[in-house]
Image: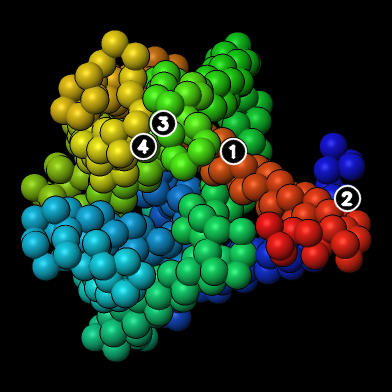
């Protein structure tokens, strides 16, 4: 392990990317402690302390505590994720956006631009809802969260602009990590926010055990479940269904090509952590608005959207299934895969090339996606099960644990890719250095 770490820091490009990523995440953590103007921090903290197990505490975990402190990053990257979901759905519906998605880099830049505009629009809407809701919030002792000397519309505009600017800045940080860091910028921001809450969650669990609110046996069962979930996530995320592919021999000039056996790797969970992140983002939008108002019917909906409630669990599972199949359909096109195999004289043993191959791949992919959706659903509703069975308000499980482990695995794979590429480059350089002038001349003549 120490040798691997030393190799990482020997590679200048990889070292610079890691340092840049760490610095960007550090900026994110600093911004998560800069409060929005016009807020009484003591009253806001007391209000959130009274919201044990609520939807607010659940989504506060994904912002790294920024929502509870109502900092400039209180909205997190959820508006960006919601805008990305909307754009992907619209790409399927509108032919213009579908053409853009097929135009290569230029088309992707336009779609990215539209996604940014959508992020700003959603941030403005959510910022307005939070600003209005804050005016009616108060601590358990009756202290208002908003400083009484603030002008109502001045406070609303200031809050909207601050929260929208914070989300736009996070969106920029994520894009910079993609370009100049180690990639997966938005996922790493969510990852950093969740990991930052682990010490607080651990201390809170210990305090609940000391106060007698949670039996020590229940805490041990929870820890065992976490270990089992980590094992299950690592096992399934690294598992593949290998479809055998045989390539026929063909003559090209005086040489024989093909004839080798290969396989088509299909992940059991090809969508990764995208479905739970998207599902959480969709549920966060109405829940955030509902959580900051005193309207009776809105409050009734908000109560049903609490983690552990039946409506929340059903909607969460339905959204996970939808995004599993939707994201897989975007990433994999069985017809295109079958055509590529046929073009290169490849076939699946026992399956006719062309349409039959596409149908077979689609059937296998559908079964794998269904299994992956079931696996994601079981893990993501684990906190709800704990809340229902043991009455444990322990939110670091399920979705959070899945995101942490999933993003961690992606991070390791990306670093390994950099290391492998560097080894290949170094090997080629050494080979070129060892060639004599006569060998180089011979290669040029050939």
Local crowd at mark 1 within 10 Å, few (<14), some, or many (≥20)? some
Residue identified by numbered label 4: 344
Q: Position of residue 311 (x, y in %)?
A: 19, 31
Picture coordinates of residue 227, whole percent (x, y): 61, 20
User: Which of the two residues, 153 or 278, is positioned nearer the viewer here?
Assistant: 278
**Which of the two discs, 4 and 3, labels the residue nearer the N terminus?**
3
Which mark is in front, 2 or 3? 3
> Considering the numbered disc 3 on the image, is that residue within a helix, a strand or a loop?
strand
Q: Nearer the viewer, residue 18 or 293?
A: 18
Q: Earlier in the sequence, mark 2 or mark 3?
A: 2
* Mark 1 or mark 3, earlier in chain: 3
Q: Are marks 1 and 4 in contact (CB under 8 Å)?
A: no
Is residue 330 in view?
yes
Which residue is identified by label 1? 409
Q: Residue at x 8, y 47 (%)?
A: 297
Q: Earlier in the sequence, mark 1 or mark 4?
A: 4
Question: Which class describes the residues within 10 Å of circle 4: few (<14), some (14-19), or many (20+)?
Answer: few
Q: In this figure, which residue is indicated by the disc labeled 3?
A: 250
| Secondary element at tag 1 | helix
Where 35 sits versus 94, above or below? below
């Amino acid at each position: 392990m120490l040798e691997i770490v030393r190799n990482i820091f020997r590679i200048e490009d990889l070292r610079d990317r890691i340092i840049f990523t760490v610095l960007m995440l550090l900026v994110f953590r600093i911004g998560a402690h800069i409060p929005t103007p016009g807020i009484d921090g003591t009253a806001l903290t007391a209000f959130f302390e009274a919201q044990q197990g609520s939807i607010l505490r659940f989504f506060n975990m994904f912002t790294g505590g920024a929502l509870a402190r109502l900092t400039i990053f209180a909205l997190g990257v959820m508006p960006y994720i919601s805008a990305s979901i909307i754009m992907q759905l619209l790409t399927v519906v509108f032919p213009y956006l579908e053409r853009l998605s097929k135009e290569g880099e230029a088309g992707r830049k336009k779609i990215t631009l539209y996604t940014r505009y959508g992020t700003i629009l959603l941030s403005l809407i959510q910022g307005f809802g939070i600003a209005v809701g804050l005016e009616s919030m108060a601590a358990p002792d009756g202290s208002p969260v908003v400083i009484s000397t603030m002008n109502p519309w001045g406070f609303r505009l200031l809050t909207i602009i601050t929260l929208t600017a914070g989300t736009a800045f996070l969106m920029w940080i994520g894009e910079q990590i993609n370009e100049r860091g180690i990639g997966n910028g938005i996922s790493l921001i969510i990852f950093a926010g969740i990991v930052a809450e682990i010490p607080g969650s651990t201390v809170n669990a210990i305090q609940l055990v000391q106060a007698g609110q949670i039996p020590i046996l229940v805490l041990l069962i929870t820890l065992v479940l976490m270990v089992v979930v980590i094992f299950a996530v690592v096992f399934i995320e690294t598992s593949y269904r290998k479809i055998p592919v045989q390539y026929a021999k063909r003559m090209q000039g005086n040489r024989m090509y093909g004839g080798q056996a290969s396989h088509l790797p299909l992940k059991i969970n090809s969508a990764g952590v995208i479905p739970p992140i998207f599902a959480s983002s969709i549920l966060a939008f109405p829940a955030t608005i509902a959580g900051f108002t005193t309207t009776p019917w809105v409050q009734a909906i908000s109560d049903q959207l609490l983690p552990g409630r039946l409506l929340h669990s059903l909607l969460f599972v339905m959204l996970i299934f939808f995004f599993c199949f939707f994201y897989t359909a975007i990433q994999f096109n069985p017809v295109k895969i079958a055509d590529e195999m046929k073009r290169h004289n490849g076939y699946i043993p026992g399956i006719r090339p062309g349409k039959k191959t596409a149908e077979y791949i689609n059937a296998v992919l559908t079964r794998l996606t269904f299994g992956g959706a079931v696996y994601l659903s079981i893990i993501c509703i684990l906190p709800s099960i704990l809340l229902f069975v043991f009455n444990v308000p322990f939110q670091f499980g399920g979705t959070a644990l899945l995101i942490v482990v999933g993003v961690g695995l992606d991070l390791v794979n990306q670093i390994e890719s950099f290391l492998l590429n560097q080894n290949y480059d170094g090997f080629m350089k050494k080979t070129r250095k060892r060639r004599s002038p006569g060998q180089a001349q011979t290669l040029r003549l050939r």
